[in-house]
Image: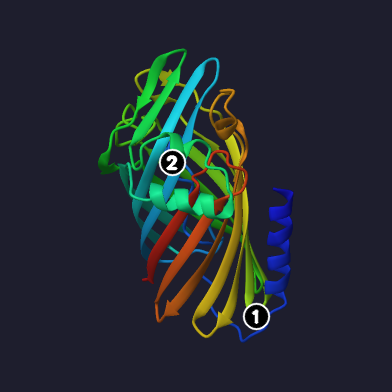
Amino acid sequence: MIRACKYLFIVVFFLTCLSSAAFSFDGPLQINNLYPIFLHADQPYLEKADIENSVSFGLSHSSTYTVESSRDWDISLDMEITELSFRYKRIINNLFEFDLDIPVLVLSGGFMDAALEDYHDAFGFPDYGRKDRPHNDFLYEVRKDGNIIIRGKTGTRLGDIRLAVKKPLMSADDYVLSIRGDIEVPVSSAEKGYSNGSLDTGFSMLFDKRISDSTMTYWNLGAVFPGDVKGHEDLDLKNYINGGLAVETRLRRNLNLIVQLHGQSEIYPDTGISAVDGRTFFIALGGRYYSGNSNYELSLTEDLNTSGSPDFIINFTYKHLL
């Protein structure tokens, strides 16, 4: 983890040394944590502090493998999740930004197990027992004291819908400071793993700081207050803090590089399973191509400490400024 952070700061230092003509920036990569038992707990995106009118469509695909037990818990996650997201942002009376986020979740056994096995073998990476299960076989169960809480089902359903308001507090030529609050409304089945069945709330402080004409940084720090999981039995989730840093810099005309680090504290009660109990850190690297009032971004996200996040997330997002 420490080594990964050192690499990130080296990249950030290099990017801030680049120079170019002034140009527009569009914020952090639009990805959130798709770890199956956390994704419905109001998982935040890193956000820019500046407000905008826009509509965007995102496609994310992730793979997760956690099949572990402790004295009291059995958590079995062997699956791939695809998220199709629609996000709408509108500035109201030049005072604040209203956000609407509607996700569609596809839970499945996937198609990537053989490729991941070859990848782990080629580089000597541990597979955490993935070889012990059939390829692309869906498994999603959470049990406590032998009692089922979540028994996930394959299929396609709406995820929880998020409503948010962002309000700028201070701004100047080279920085913007804003506050953002949100609620996440349950619309799907908690028993089948598509929701937690409860209302979640969160808030965050957002800070954009221009480093040079060609480089912008984005800083986020927030807290989330998730509701209980209303599964086959109720499960209390912890309030958690989250934060992150993203750097966007121009590589060439119309093409930007974005690198970001995101972390969050524990969400589940203590389970005795390290893949669930540890703090979550993941790093993302991507590019964004600008074309008029639209842009396209492609990114890859990797977990840094194999706790509380998928093995990887691939994301493609299209955004149009209104």
Asked whether residue 79 is in view, the answer is yes
How many badges with numbers are in the image?
A: 2
Q: Which mark is residue 183?
A: 2
Q: Nearer the viewer, residue 14 or 311?
A: 311
Horizontal and vertical percent for residue 114?
A: 39, 49
Q: Is residue 168 above or below residue 255?
A: above
Say what amino acid the circle numbered 1 marks: Asp
Horizontal and vertical percent for residue 155?
A: 25, 40
Give the colour scheme shown. rainbow
Horizontal and vertical percent for residue 75?
A: 46, 27
Q: Earlier in the sequence, mark 1 or mark 2?
A: 2
Location of mark 1 (residue) = 213
Mark 2, other Cα within 10 Å: few <14 / some 14–19 / many ≥20: many
Q: Which mark is residue 156?
A: none
Q: Nearer the viewer, residue 244 or 321?
A: 244
Q: Residue drawn at (50%, 60%), measured in percent from left and top?
A: 300
Mark 1, other Cα within 10 Å: few <14 / some 14–19 / many ≥20: some
Say what amino acid the circle numbered 2 marks: Ile
Q: Is residue 282 above or below residue 74?
A: below
Query: SS for tag 2?
Result: strand
Q: Is residue 152 left or right of residue 11?
A: left
Q: Nearer the viewer, residue 164 or 48?
A: 48
Q: Is residue 212 above or below residue 101?
A: below
Q: Is residue 3 left or right of residue 96?
A: right
Instruction: Tell me the distance, in whole angstroms, between the alpha carbons under discs 1 and 2.
Output: 35 Å
Q: Residue drawn at (69%, 48%), measured in percent from left and top?
A: 1
Query: SS for tag 1?
Result: loop
Tell me which corner region of the image, top left, top right, bottom left or bottom right, holds residue 78.
top left
Horizontal and vertical percent for residue 4?
A: 68, 54
Q: Is residue 227 above or below residue 154?
A: above
